[in-house]
Image (spheres, helix red, strand yellow):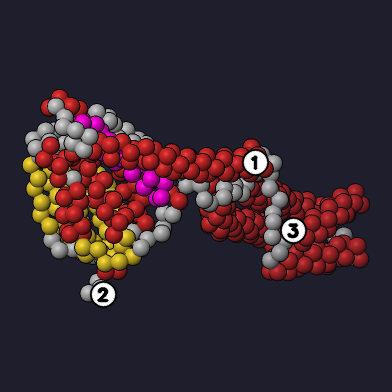
Amino acid sequence: MNFPRPNSFLKLLLFGFAVVVTPLLIALAFAVIITDRMADQSQHAVYKSARATQNSRMLLEQVTIMERAARQYHVLGDKALFNTYREAHDLFVKTVGELNNLFVDQSLKQELKDISHTEQAILDSLQRHPYSSEQIKNAVGEFVSLASKSREVLSGSQTVIDREVEVMYGLASNAQRLFFWFGLALIPVMIIIVVGITYVISRPVRQIEAAIMSLGDGSFASPIKVIGPKNLEILGERLDWLRQRLAEVEQEKVKFLRHVSHELKTPLTALREGTDLLADGVVGQLSPEQKEVVTILGSNTAQLQGLIEDLLNFSRAHLKPSALDQDRVALDKLMRRVLSDQKLAIIAKQLNLRVKFEPVSVRGDKEKLRVVLDNLLSNAVKFSPRKGKVEIAIRKIGNNAAVDIRDSGPGIQPREHERVFEAFYQGEAVAEGHIKGTGLGLSIARDYVQAHGGQISVNEKSTSGAHLMLRLPMEAAQGIS
């Protein structure tokens, strides 16, 4: 399923910010709603408590007024006093009704009901009997009980306050629990959202970085595809176009090197043959001066042939990097063959050669491994000073065959440990000789070693000269006899 993607990286950032902020806004809205509800509840509680206290006091005041008016009416029989009682009675009934609505406790409701019945009985007596009768006297005496019950109602109004406080406390506790669980649930949600948004935002950046690193490493085989905002996808398409162009340039370079190497090899062969004929005296005896010139020509043509062989090997390594003619290869014997091939160069520089070989065999391409060892040894010979020292060790390390070659030359700077394996890279150290190398020897060696599943590197702990380490897996050769 293809999801719609923003047109720009900025829109993606804004979208990510909105997604991250949304849960926080929801939490804020939830907090506002709960707080508003608590404020309404507290306002209602305060109002209800105040009304209950006020009406309870008014109830007691009305009872006092009615008692005074009834007693005076019982003595004087004045109709105005009875009317005063009736007015107080009406207000008393209204107050009882409001208190009945405010109270929740059933005992208080029953108390109000008893007070109301008692007061209604007093009013009936005042209406039916003469003011000085015994019935009126008994009715007026009921005010003592009525006043006592009214004071109990006043005291009971405190329960209304307590109940409202309890309700508010319960609401606050519920809100606290809700906030806690909401916050607890929000934490993993926020982590998931932040991780997801970070991945979505960083993925195209990582893809672009990987593509640039791949191009920098000279890997042009894999297509470049960036998934993300439209403008970054367009950048990915541009990088893929650049990859294709670089791949074409690389192919043209390899083709050019191959053609030039072959074209150079033919006239060089003629030069070497002519030099050999002159050195052998086929065309006549040479004077000592002429022999010296012929020797110099032979030495330089040999160096030129080595450079051309490097170019050809480089072309082969890039054309068919994985084409290996597998066979059992004894590295110690192969190294002795390479030493024999370079014997003249070692003698010419009067190098002190120290070797320590263990019988070690691997499965691989014998010719390619010969090129690897030859390039490593020629590199050591080239940079060693006259009468210098070259050490070669071949041994087993675990399941690997190890070849270590040390020289007493100027060494390799730490910043060049990786770059010396790049094609055409010329290090800071200067080799002795009239003709500089192509900078392909170690690059070819690395390509061939990697094709065998091995590794080649510079020993970073070396303090004098260069120390190159070759490691090849031996597992494939264990069953060969």
* Residue at position x 33%, y 41% in the image: 269
Q: Nearer the viewer, residue 379 or 406?
A: 379
Which numbered tag is attached to residue 234?
1
Between disc 1 and disc 2, the foreground one is 2
Q: Earlier in the sequence, mark 3 or mark 1?
A: 3
Spatial CA distance of label 3 from label 1 is 73 Å
The segment highlighted magenta reads 294-317
C-alpha separation, residue under disc 1 versus residue under disc 2: 53 Å
Give amino acid for label 3.
Answer: Leu
Q: Quadrant of residue 15?
A: top right
User: In the rendered structure, which disc, 1 or 2, sits on the residue that comes first in sequence?
Assistant: 1
Residue 340 forms part of the magenta stretch:
no
Give the label on residue 252, or none. none
Q: Secondary structure at mark 1?
A: helix
The kind of residue on which mark 2 rests is: Gly
Whether residue 461 is visible here, answered yes or no, is no
| Label 3 SS | helix
Dot 2 surroundings within 10 Å: few (below 14), some, or many (20 or more)? few
In front: mark 2 or mark 3?
2
- Residue linked to disc 3: 102
Looking at the image, residue 72 sits to the left or right of residue 108; the answer is right
- In this rendering, does residue 223 appear at all? yes
> Viewer-nearest of labels 3 and 1?
1
